[in-house]
Image (cartoon, rainbow, N blue to C red):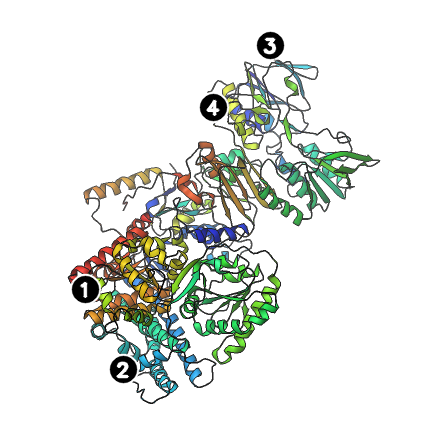
Amino acid sequence: MADTTLPVIEGALLKVAQDKGFATARDRLEVMSPQCGFGELGTCCRICYMGPCRIDPFGNGPKTGVCGLTPDAMVARNLLRDTVGGTASHVGHARHVLLTLRDALNGKAPYQIKGVSKVMALAKTFGVPTEGREVNDICRDLVNIALEDFGRQDELPNNWISKRAPAEEQALWSDLGLMYSNPHNEIETAMHATSMGNDADPVSLMLRVLKMSLIDGWTGLTLCVDLQDILFGVPEIAVTEAAVGVLEENSVNVAAHGHNPVLSEKILEWAEKLEGDAIAAGAERINVVGVCCTGNELSMRHGVKLAAHNSQTELILATGAVDAMVVDIQCIWPQLAQVAKCFDTAFITTDAMVRIPDAIHIPFEPHHADESAREIVQKAIDAFRRRRGKPVDIPRHKSTAVAGLSVEAIVDLLAKLDAEDPLKPVIDNVANGNIFGFVGVVGCSSIKFRDNAMTEEMVKHLLRQNVLVLTTGCTAHICAQDGLMTSEATYRYCGDGLKAVLEVLGKAAGLDGPLPPVWHMGACVDNSRIVDLMVALAERLGVKVGQLPAVGSAPELVQEKAVSIGGSFLALGVSCHIAPAPRILGGPMVTKLLTEDLQELTGAVVRVELEPKGAADWMIAHIAGKRAALGI
Amino acid sequence: MSKTIFTVAEKCVACKSCEIACAVEHSRSKTLAGAILETPPPQRRINVEGVGAYSYPSRCQHCSDAACVTACPTGAMQRDGCDAVFSDADKCIGCWMCVVVCPFGGVSADPVGKKALKCDRCPERTAKGEAPACVAACPTGTLLYLTPEEFAAERRQATARAAICGGQADEPNGMDILRSLKRTH
Amino acid sequence: MKIVIIGNGPAAISAAETLRARDRGCEIVMLSRERVPFYSPCPLAEYVEGSVSRERLFLRDADFYARNAIDIRYGSPVRRIEPSARRVWSGDEAVAYDRLLIASGSRAFVPPIPGLAGARGVFELKTLDDAEGILRRLAVARRAVVVGSGFIGLEATQALVRHGLEVTLLEAREHVLPAMLDSEMAALVERRLVEHGVRVRTGCAVERVLEGADGVRAVIADGDEIPCELLVCAAGVRADLSILEGSGIASERGILVDARMRTNVEHIFAAGDIIERPDAPEKNRVAPNWPNAVSSGRIAACNMLGIDRRHPGLEAVNVVRVFDMPIASFGVQTGETCLRWQDGAGAVRKVLLESGRVAGGQLIGEINGAGVLHEMMKKGTAVERFGTHLVHPGFGYIHTMEPLRAVKWA
């Protein structure tokens, strides 16, 4: 630990907090350490009240729970419950977007359809007639198809996975019993199966983990992103900036934090409408900045600047320059309200599910989106009025970043090279080794790994070996802040092959230099975009997704959502690197299943590496194996 | 020789059961449910410290030439009949001299009760023939309450067993894997 | 063998107890300036405050001296030492010795401020007499001035505040606790004092003390008149070296002793607050505190009996509480590198490093583990490998040990 490579931005932010006497998550983690080995191994079972039961990893003490549950079943049950947590989060988000879209179409919620191209594309996928029909009518049909998924009790296959997922993989999932019907039923079943006296077979439980992950992948992510693109538009390549330096001393700084663009889009809209009020209050303008994944959503669609990833959220409040932080769901630390209290920052919760003591709560629901958004932005202007003239402490670090690389944007770009067969240039360069492979770097930013700049350093190792990095979520923030989404990064970090490809793409995109080597594909929910791209490449090549020279990595896993996303990659046959270790090591059979035997089932394995070089080396070796199998 | 507390550090998984049991033993009610409701809250005298990939339940060493006893200006810090060093809370004025002279960090300052806190080896339990609370609560056999002869004999037997069974006959357990991962971090 | 001990404090008592434990036959004479049995001076402020009773101060029972066959002579200050004749003079009486231990301690330093010395209502807080004088004065005192903000000054301040007095604390240097803390840490202490109603004036020179018919009535400091009925002078302590005159015993700030507590004069030893260790690092040459008194008394006793024992080194660590907020400090106050930790609730810890080794530390609010850091400073442990963990309260001695062997032990 003495030998740290703490990123400069983290260092500068920590200094701001420290100078003001704030304890941060790093301090709280220190106090928490060392953390409980039973928890880390997954062999603490608190599911029933004969427990809590803990298995002695050294074999002298208890070998099973009071009910006789084996350590393997114990870790599998716990992992399934983690996965349910992740899947429930995304499915809940997806349903919220679906109902907003339904209400928008019914004229009950003030949102318009901005993604007409997406409506048309999905209509084709789902066989919805389009000839001579209004966009809203087509869209209504799509909404009904989605609503059917959430309401059916007929055990027929779920519409979204069966129409959106590749056919060959679906056949495998069917054989393994992993196809699902209604996601809500499955969440219920999983909770039921893991409660006391139910499923005690580790293999059965691990298959449930994969099934739950598929629900996350195809309903939680894909359906959600499809509908978000309909409502808010399909992202196009945009240049933005990232890191705390995007805060402006003399503007009303509104930080949108959370995950659901249904809120943040409205905040952005009202920030523009109320700019006059802000100027009247003495501000230069209203500066909406993005935090965490809703920040990614805004940057993808509007080029909104990215202020902070999840583990920096309390730190940017310590600058004293944030006038309002408005949050919706997921990854909202309760600590934020405590830091906000020390300044004039209005910390505003909006969702009934996310209530935090000492926060201002302004209920935000789509029917009254305009009124609520207006009130929230007004609160920010009021806070600015109180803050005006007081000293703030904004570290000036920031980097430019290219965002908005949706699959559609990538294909549009590639079409400039080959209009007939847009994916061909990519395929050719993968075959000739200029692109050695792909790594989807996804997930969170973790206090446990910021000290050694895990994500940044791992990505740099990958780029040197000509691996193209696709990223989302908080790891996208990390890469953006570190300047990895710039043309300079291509020159500085990429191997010659990858550099050459990105130079050609940069020219096609009309950029001054090469395309950046790390592609910002959105929020964590947008991991479906990475999957869509892989599926498209696999179909073009005529192989299964699992055969592609591609790996997933969650180098700084924090949230349960990252567990279920990882599971959805594994089900697709895409191997995953993760750090820290998943809580399964107390179950030797489950450990072997995930790290070795899963290969036989879906073609994927899990690998844990806690330092950047080791992680990159393993992924590169794994990709090399895939390439050899493809004969390239 | 009388029994004392031994620590087999490689078995500690940092579950902190010893910390909770210690606080409960030093509460008025001596039950977890009662202890958490007490004011001031009972305090533990054992502290699980992280050391790289390992952890270690750290407590007073009951030194023979104890710096804390020398340093105590009120006569509170003293030795009991079983050679354990303990602090008489009635005499302690919370000057914290013991805290700052203990080279092991074995005495801590109770911010609420304003008394020095340290392991007293649970005299009420040991008088009844029970092991100290931390030992009784340890689920992995990290903390042992044995005479030095018993402890040496156990270690000899374990070494012999390992030699006869070929030492590394077992597959690495989850804790071994977790630690080897953490060592690279 | 006849052993004479000058003093009746912790060094003297620990020496006497060690002597008696090791040698049942020797004759022990203790010459005490004061007229009360051995008591602990450390809780005197608590005694003034009312949280410690008078009897709690006395750490030995009534027949301690008789039971140990110690000839205790109260009210017998030593005037002169005559090594050539192996005797000391207490008043007009000469007391012969085979071995002599000087453990007469330190005295409060009284700065040369006009009107200060001898004024009624002016006290130090070093002896039981001082404490009882303060307690008596409380009957007429409503306002107090404390001169000096070392730990005695701060303890006196708290005791007086808790008696409901309006207290003004005067410190000549730029911040409080100047010997223990840097200005940033001292500011936290000052805030704590102010929160409890203390008027703190730093960088403030006391010009004179005004006395009226009822004793002290005001202090003039920086041109201001600060009315008070009670004044506590806590401007530091000095080794009491007056008895050395003409004895040939070498001294600087204290009596110079080696690791066996021997002075330069044969058969004469010294222990406790009065000693200075020329072989110890600069910072540790004088460290008047309880643990050093007890340990040096014990070492001196052994060597007086011909049992070879060396002192491992003085504890140069200070600890004080300011309205229940603990403060510990040791070593230097500025270093090449300063590691810092805080909990956001008022606790701040700083560890200062020089050439990759602990050179000092200042801990406020959260002092657990101070002894571990202090021990590493004494040992000169290389600490770079610990990084910032060093300053965290969870850092324990176990970190300093060799890596655990990854042995399998079934």
Give the residue number, with chain letter if any, for mark 2. A156
Disc 2 versus disc 3: distance between alpha carbons? 112 Å
Q: Can you give x and y, in whole percent of width and height, for residue A586 in the image?
A: 30, 57
Q: Nearer the viewer, residue C254 or A255?
A: A255
**Image height of B102 relative to B178, above or below:** above
For numbered disc 4, what is the local secondary structure? loop
> Could you tell whether A413 is left or right of B77 in the image?
left
**Circle 1 chain:** A
- The amino acid pointed to by label 2 is Leu
Nearer the observer, disc 2 or disc 3?
A: 2
Label 3 environment density (alpha carbons within 10 Å; few <14, some 14–19, many ≥20)? few
For numbered disc 3, what is the local secondary structure? helix
> Could you tell whether A162 is left or right of C178 in the image?
left
> Could you tell whether C383 is left or right of C185 in the image?
left
Nearer the observer, disc 3 or disc 1?
A: 1
Q: Can you give x and y, in whole percent of width and height, for residue C322 in the image?
A: 62, 44
Disc number at residue C84? 3
**Circle 2 chain:** A
Q: Is residue C366 visible?
A: no
Please give the name of the residue rendered at 55% of the width and 46% of the height, measured from the top-left corner: C365
Disc 4 versus disc 2: distance between alpha carbons? 87 Å
- The amino acid pointed to by label 3 is Ser
Labels 3 and 1 in the same subunit: no
User: Total number of numbered labels?
Assistant: 4
**Quadrant where the N terminus of chain B lies?**
top left
Give the residue number, with chain letter if any, for mark 1. A600
Disc number at residue C310? 4
